[in-house]
Image (tube, rainbow, N blue to C red):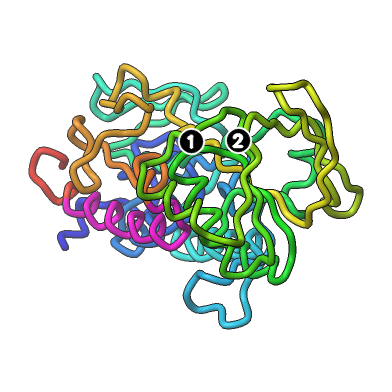
Protein backbone atom coordinates (compact mmCIF):
# COMPACT_ATOMS: atom_id res chain seq x y z
CA UNK A 1 0.00 0.00 0.00
CA UNK A 2 1.31 3.45 -0.91
CA UNK A 3 0.83 4.99 2.50
CA UNK A 4 2.05 8.46 1.44
CA UNK A 5 -1.45 9.02 0.09
CA UNK A 6 -2.97 8.56 3.54
CA UNK A 7 -2.92 10.92 6.49
CA UNK A 8 -2.83 9.71 10.08
CA UNK A 9 -5.05 12.66 10.97
CA UNK A 10 -5.95 15.85 9.08
CA UNK A 11 -4.51 19.06 10.51
CA UNK A 12 -8.01 20.53 10.34
CA UNK A 13 -10.38 18.30 12.36
CA UNK A 14 -13.02 18.97 9.71
CA UNK A 15 -10.88 17.22 7.11
CA UNK A 16 -10.55 16.25 4.45
CA UNK A 17 -10.54 12.80 5.99
CA UNK A 18 -9.61 9.76 3.94
CA UNK A 19 -12.89 8.22 5.05
CA UNK A 20 -15.85 9.33 7.11
CA UNK A 21 -17.96 6.49 8.48
CA UNK A 22 -21.57 7.41 9.21
CA UNK A 23 -22.86 5.05 11.87
CA UNK A 24 -21.37 3.22 14.82
CA UNK A 25 -22.81 -0.29 14.99
CA UNK A 26 -20.79 -3.45 14.31
CA UNK A 27 -20.51 -2.59 10.59
CA UNK A 28 -19.20 0.94 11.05
CA UNK A 29 -16.80 0.15 13.88
CA UNK A 30 -15.38 -2.91 12.12
CA UNK A 31 -14.87 -0.83 8.97
CA UNK A 32 -12.98 1.72 11.08
CA UNK A 33 -10.68 -0.96 12.47
CA UNK A 34 -9.70 -1.90 8.92
CA UNK A 35 -9.36 1.62 7.52
CA UNK A 36 -7.24 2.85 10.42
CA UNK A 37 -5.01 -0.22 10.28
CA UNK A 38 -4.65 0.56 6.59
CA UNK A 39 -3.30 4.01 7.55
CA UNK A 40 -6.37 5.90 6.29
CA UNK A 41 -7.45 8.85 8.44
CA UNK A 42 -10.87 7.88 9.72
CA UNK A 43 -13.66 9.88 11.31
CA UNK A 44 -16.69 8.12 12.75
CA UNK A 45 -19.87 10.15 13.04
CA UNK A 46 -21.39 7.82 15.58
CA UNK A 47 -24.70 9.56 16.18
CA UNK A 48 -26.18 11.04 19.33
CA UNK A 49 -27.23 7.51 20.31
CA UNK A 50 -24.34 5.37 19.21
CA UNK A 51 -23.77 1.62 18.96
CA UNK A 52 -26.78 0.44 16.99
CA UNK A 53 -29.32 -2.19 18.02
CA UNK A 54 -26.87 -4.11 20.21
CA UNK A 55 -27.08 -1.29 22.75
CA UNK A 56 -30.63 -2.56 23.42
CA UNK A 57 -29.57 -6.21 23.71
CA UNK A 58 -28.73 -8.03 26.91
CA UNK A 59 -26.43 -11.06 26.52
CA UNK A 60 -25.12 -11.80 23.03
CA UNK A 61 -24.30 -15.49 22.73
CA UNK A 62 -23.76 -15.79 18.97
CA UNK A 63 -20.85 -13.41 18.40
CA UNK A 64 -17.60 -15.38 17.95
CA UNK A 65 -14.93 -15.10 20.59
CA UNK A 66 -17.13 -14.82 23.68
CA UNK A 67 -17.64 -18.34 24.98
CA UNK A 68 -19.68 -17.14 27.96
CA UNK A 69 -21.59 -14.52 25.99
CA UNK A 70 -21.18 -10.75 26.22
CA UNK A 71 -23.52 -7.89 27.05
CA UNK A 72 -24.46 -6.00 23.88
CA UNK A 73 -23.29 -2.58 25.16
CA UNK A 74 -20.01 -4.08 26.38
CA UNK A 75 -19.37 -5.64 22.96
CA UNK A 76 -19.96 -2.30 21.27
CA UNK A 77 -17.69 -0.48 23.73
CA UNK A 78 -14.93 -3.00 22.97
CA UNK A 79 -15.35 -2.45 19.22
CA UNK A 80 -15.28 1.31 19.69
CA UNK A 81 -12.15 1.17 21.85
CA UNK A 82 -10.42 -1.06 19.32
CA UNK A 83 -11.13 1.37 16.47
CA UNK A 84 -9.93 4.29 18.57
CA UNK A 85 -6.76 2.42 19.55
CA UNK A 86 -5.78 2.34 15.89
CA UNK A 87 -6.44 6.05 15.44
CA UNK A 88 -10.10 6.48 14.53
CA UNK A 89 -11.68 9.72 15.69
CA UNK A 90 -15.16 9.26 17.16
CA UNK A 91 -17.80 11.97 17.45
CA UNK A 92 -21.18 11.36 19.06
CA UNK A 93 -23.03 13.56 16.58
CA UNK A 94 -25.62 12.86 13.91
CA UNK A 95 -24.87 13.43 10.25
CA UNK A 96 -27.58 15.86 9.13
CA UNK A 97 -26.93 16.02 5.37
CA UNK A 98 -24.39 15.14 2.71
CA UNK A 99 -23.34 16.72 -0.58
CA UNK A 100 -22.14 14.08 -3.02
CA UNK A 101 -21.70 16.54 -5.90
CA UNK A 102 -18.49 17.98 -4.42
CA UNK A 103 -15.04 16.47 -4.17
CA UNK A 104 -14.23 15.84 -1.42
CA UNK A 105 -17.72 15.03 -0.19
CA UNK A 106 -19.26 17.39 2.36
CA UNK A 107 -21.08 16.12 5.43
CA UNK A 108 -22.90 18.47 7.75
CA UNK A 109 -23.20 17.42 11.37
CA UNK A 110 -24.40 19.89 13.95
CA UNK A 111 -22.89 23.26 13.15
CA UNK A 112 -19.84 21.85 11.36
CA UNK A 113 -19.08 20.60 7.87
CA UNK A 114 -16.71 17.65 7.49
CA UNK A 115 -14.87 16.77 4.28
CA UNK A 116 -14.35 13.19 3.14
CA UNK A 117 -12.49 11.59 0.24
CA UNK A 118 -14.73 8.56 0.76
CA UNK A 119 -17.77 7.66 2.84
CA UNK A 120 -19.02 4.42 4.36
CA UNK A 121 -22.75 4.36 5.05
CA UNK A 122 -23.25 2.19 8.13
CA UNK A 123 -26.36 3.70 9.68
CA UNK A 124 -28.13 0.35 10.13
CA UNK A 125 -31.84 -0.26 10.37
CA UNK A 126 -34.23 0.45 13.18
CA UNK A 127 -36.61 -2.17 14.49
CA UNK A 128 -40.22 -1.16 14.07
CA UNK A 129 -41.66 -1.50 17.56
CA UNK A 130 -45.28 -1.64 18.57
CA UNK A 131 -46.76 1.64 19.81
CA UNK A 132 -48.55 -0.13 22.65
CA UNK A 133 -47.74 1.23 26.13
CA UNK A 134 -45.07 -0.69 27.99
CA UNK A 135 -43.46 -2.33 24.96
CA UNK A 136 -40.48 -0.01 24.53
CA UNK A 137 -40.01 0.27 28.28
CA UNK A 138 -39.57 -3.51 28.51
CA UNK A 139 -37.07 -3.92 25.67
CA UNK A 140 -34.33 -6.17 27.05
CA UNK A 141 -36.63 -7.18 29.91
CA UNK A 142 -38.63 -9.78 28.03
CA UNK A 143 -39.28 -7.78 24.87
CA UNK A 144 -36.98 -8.50 21.93
CA UNK A 145 -36.81 -8.37 18.16
CA UNK A 146 -34.26 -11.13 17.54
CA UNK A 147 -35.07 -14.77 18.26
CA UNK A 148 -31.67 -16.06 17.07
CA UNK A 149 -30.11 -13.70 19.63
CA UNK A 150 -32.39 -14.18 22.62
CA UNK A 151 -34.38 -17.41 22.21
CA UNK A 152 -32.13 -19.46 24.56
CA UNK A 153 -33.15 -17.20 27.47
CA UNK A 154 -36.73 -18.43 27.11
CA UNK A 155 -36.11 -22.15 27.43
CA UNK A 156 -39.23 -23.83 28.77
CA UNK A 157 -41.17 -20.56 28.85
CA UNK A 158 -44.24 -19.16 27.12
CA UNK A 159 -43.58 -16.48 24.51
CA UNK A 160 -45.49 -14.46 21.92
CA UNK A 161 -44.52 -13.24 18.45
CA UNK A 162 -46.21 -10.28 16.78
CA UNK A 163 -46.25 -10.19 12.99
CA UNK A 164 -47.46 -11.96 9.89
CA UNK A 165 -44.58 -11.95 7.44
CA UNK A 166 -41.70 -14.33 6.80
CA UNK A 167 -39.63 -12.79 9.57
CA UNK A 168 -42.38 -13.46 12.11
CA UNK A 169 -42.67 -17.07 10.94
CA UNK A 170 -38.92 -17.51 11.25
CA UNK A 171 -38.88 -15.96 14.72
CA UNK A 172 -41.62 -18.34 15.84
CA UNK A 173 -39.86 -21.37 14.37
CA UNK A 174 -36.59 -20.52 16.11
CA UNK A 175 -38.38 -20.00 19.40
CA UNK A 176 -40.00 -23.46 19.30
CA UNK A 177 -36.55 -24.96 19.82
CA UNK A 178 -36.50 -23.45 23.30
CA UNK A 179 -39.90 -22.20 24.46
CA UNK A 180 -42.63 -24.49 25.74
CA UNK A 181 -45.31 -22.56 23.83
CA UNK A 182 -45.19 -19.92 21.10
CA UNK A 183 -48.19 -17.75 20.32
CA UNK A 184 -48.27 -15.75 17.09
CA UNK A 185 -50.39 -12.63 17.41
CA UNK A 186 -51.54 -11.19 14.09
CA UNK A 187 -53.87 -8.27 13.52
CA UNK A 188 -55.36 -9.76 10.35
CA UNK A 189 -57.04 -13.08 9.52
CA UNK A 190 -54.27 -14.28 7.22
CA UNK A 191 -50.48 -14.08 7.02
CA UNK A 192 -48.42 -12.25 4.41
CA UNK A 193 -45.66 -14.85 4.73
CA UNK A 194 -44.80 -17.28 1.96
CA UNK A 195 -46.87 -20.44 1.69
CA UNK A 196 -43.91 -22.60 2.70
CA UNK A 197 -43.26 -20.56 5.84
CA UNK A 198 -46.94 -20.58 6.77
CA UNK A 199 -47.18 -24.33 6.39
CA UNK A 200 -44.12 -24.84 8.55
CA UNK A 201 -45.62 -22.74 11.33
CA UNK A 202 -49.14 -24.16 11.16
CA UNK A 203 -47.86 -27.72 11.38
CA UNK A 204 -45.77 -27.05 14.49
CA UNK A 205 -47.64 -28.33 17.58
CA UNK A 206 -45.89 -25.77 19.81
CA UNK A 207 -47.34 -22.81 17.90
CA UNK A 208 -50.74 -21.29 18.50
CA UNK A 209 -52.14 -18.45 16.36
CA UNK A 210 -54.35 -15.60 17.52
CA UNK A 211 -56.01 -14.01 14.48
CA UNK A 212 -57.44 -10.48 14.29
CA UNK A 213 -55.65 -9.63 17.50
CA UNK A 214 -53.52 -6.69 18.57
CA UNK A 215 -51.33 -6.02 21.60
CA UNK A 216 -52.70 -2.95 23.36
CA UNK A 217 -50.38 -3.00 26.37
CA UNK A 218 -47.35 -4.83 27.76
CA UNK A 219 -47.41 -5.31 31.52
CA UNK A 220 -44.55 -5.72 33.96
CA UNK A 221 -42.24 -3.70 36.19
CA UNK A 222 -38.90 -5.50 36.32
CA UNK A 223 -39.72 -7.85 33.43
CA UNK A 224 -42.56 -8.64 31.03
CA UNK A 225 -45.41 -10.47 32.75
CA UNK A 226 -48.41 -10.30 30.44
CA UNK A 227 -50.02 -8.69 27.39
CA UNK A 228 -53.36 -6.97 27.12
CA UNK A 229 -54.98 -7.99 23.85
CA UNK A 230 -57.91 -6.82 21.76
CA UNK A 231 -59.72 -8.86 19.13
CA UNK A 232 -60.78 -6.61 16.24
CA UNK A 233 -63.40 -9.10 15.01
CA UNK A 234 -65.59 -8.97 18.10
CA UNK A 235 -63.94 -6.14 20.12
CA UNK A 236 -63.31 -8.51 23.01
CA UNK A 237 -60.32 -7.99 25.30
CA UNK A 238 -58.15 -10.46 27.19
CA UNK A 239 -54.95 -10.76 29.19
CA UNK A 240 -52.25 -13.19 28.08
CA UNK A 241 -49.53 -14.15 30.61
CA UNK A 242 -46.19 -14.52 28.77
CA UNK A 243 -42.51 -14.46 29.61
CA UNK A 244 -41.38 -13.00 26.31
CA UNK A 245 -42.59 -10.90 23.40
CA UNK A 246 -40.80 -10.91 20.05
CA UNK A 247 -41.74 -8.07 17.72
CA UNK A 248 -41.36 -8.96 14.04
CA UNK A 249 -43.21 -6.28 12.13
CA UNK A 250 -40.22 -5.17 10.09
CA UNK A 251 -37.23 -2.85 10.05
CA UNK A 252 -36.79 0.65 8.68
CA UNK A 253 -33.36 1.43 7.22
CA UNK A 254 -31.84 4.66 8.52
CA UNK A 255 -31.41 6.25 5.11
CA UNK A 256 -33.32 9.53 5.39
CA UNK A 257 -30.31 11.75 4.66
CA UNK A 258 -29.30 9.64 1.66
CA UNK A 259 -32.58 9.95 -0.24
CA UNK A 260 -31.92 11.54 -3.60
CA UNK A 261 -28.16 11.14 -3.08
CA UNK A 262 -27.60 7.39 -3.47
CA UNK A 263 -29.86 4.77 -5.00
CA UNK A 264 -32.31 3.16 -2.58
CA UNK A 265 -34.68 0.27 -3.19
CA UNK A 266 -38.44 0.47 -2.77
CA UNK A 267 -38.10 -0.26 0.97
CA UNK A 268 -35.46 2.41 1.51
CA UNK A 269 -32.42 0.10 1.77
CA UNK A 270 -29.25 1.20 -0.03
CA UNK A 271 -28.76 -0.55 -3.36
CA UNK A 272 -25.33 -2.10 -3.59
CA UNK A 273 -22.93 -4.17 -5.63
CA UNK A 274 -20.76 -5.74 -2.99
CA UNK A 275 -20.11 -2.72 -0.79
CA UNK A 276 -20.27 -0.16 -3.60
CA UNK A 277 -23.14 2.27 -4.12
CA UNK A 278 -23.95 4.07 -7.37
CA UNK A 279 -21.71 6.97 -6.26
CA UNK A 280 -17.97 6.50 -6.73
CA UNK A 281 -16.28 6.78 -3.36
CA UNK A 282 -19.40 5.96 -1.36
CA UNK A 283 -19.63 2.52 0.20
CA UNK A 284 -22.18 0.74 2.35
CA UNK A 285 -22.10 -1.96 5.02
CA UNK A 286 -24.46 -3.67 7.42
CA UNK A 287 -28.20 -3.66 8.00
CA UNK A 288 -28.66 -0.47 6.02
CA UNK A 289 -28.47 -2.66 2.91
CA UNK A 290 -28.76 -6.18 4.33
CA UNK A 291 -32.32 -7.18 5.16
CA UNK A 292 -31.67 -10.91 4.80
CA UNK A 293 -29.42 -11.78 7.75
CA UNK A 294 -29.53 -8.80 10.13
CA UNK A 295 -26.95 -10.24 12.53
CA UNK A 296 -24.10 -8.50 14.35
CA UNK A 297 -21.54 -10.90 12.92
CA UNK A 298 -22.69 -10.38 9.32
CA UNK A 299 -22.74 -6.61 9.86
CA UNK A 300 -19.15 -6.84 11.08
CA UNK A 301 -18.27 -8.91 8.02
CA UNK A 302 -19.75 -6.29 5.71
CA UNK A 303 -17.79 -3.66 7.66
CA UNK A 304 -14.58 -5.55 6.98
CA UNK A 305 -15.40 -5.68 3.28
CA UNK A 306 -16.26 -1.98 3.11
CA UNK A 307 -13.09 -1.00 4.96
CA UNK A 308 -10.91 -3.00 2.58
CA UNK A 309 -12.76 -1.66 -0.46
CA UNK A 310 -12.25 1.91 0.74
CA UNK A 311 -8.51 1.32 1.08
CA UNK A 312 -8.40 0.02 -2.49
CA UNK A 313 -10.41 3.03 -3.67
CA UNK A 314 -8.07 5.47 -1.94
CA UNK A 315 -5.11 3.95 -3.77
CA UNK A 316 -6.68 4.62 -7.16
CA UNK A 317 -5.17 7.60 -9.09
CA UNK A 318 -8.42 9.58 -9.21
CA UNK A 319 -8.67 9.63 -5.44
CA UNK A 320 -5.22 11.04 -4.80
Q: Quadrant of the N terminus?
A: bottom left
Mark 1 falls on what kind of element? loop
Residue 182 seen from this side? yes
Return the x and y of residue 256 as percentages of the image width and height: 45, 23
Return the x and y of residue 293 as percentages of the image width and height: 39, 53
Number of the label disc, if any, that sits on residue 186: 2
Q: Residue furthest bottom?
A: 67
Return the x and y of residue 180 as percentages of the image width and height: 69, 66
Return the x and y of residue 295 as percentages of the image width and height: 46, 57
| C-alpha gap between disc 1 and disc 2 | 8 Å
Q: Where 267 falls versus 283 (above or below)?
A: above
Residue 227 on the magenta segment = no
Residue depicted at x 34% and y 36%: 16
The residue carrying pointer 1 sits among few (fewer than 14), some (14 to 19) or many (20 or more) residues within 10 Å by Cα, namely: some
Q: Quadrant of the C terminus?
A: top left
Cβ–Cβ under 8 Å for marks 1 and 2: yes
Asked whether 307 or 124 is in front, the reply is: 124
Mark 2 falls on what kind of element? loop
Residue depicted at x 18% and y 42%: 273
Q: Residue furthest top?
A: 260
Q: Quadrant location of residue 283?
A: top left
Asked whether, in this view, residue 24 is left or right of residue 255, the answer is right
Residue depicted at x 44% and y 21%: 97
Whichever of labels 1 and 2 marks the residue nearer the N terminus, that label is: 2
Residue indicated by mark 1: 191
Give, as a single range, the part of the protein colored magenta: 293-312
Amino acid sequence: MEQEFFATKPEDPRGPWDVVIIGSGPAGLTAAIYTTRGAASTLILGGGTWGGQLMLTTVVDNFPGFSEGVEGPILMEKMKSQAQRFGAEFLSVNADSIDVTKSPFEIKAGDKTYLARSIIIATGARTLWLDAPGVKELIGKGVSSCAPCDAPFFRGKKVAVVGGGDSAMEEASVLTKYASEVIIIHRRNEFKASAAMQEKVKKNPKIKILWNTEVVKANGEVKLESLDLKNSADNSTSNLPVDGLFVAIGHAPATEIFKGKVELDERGFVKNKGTKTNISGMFVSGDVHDHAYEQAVTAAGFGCMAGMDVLSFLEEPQSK
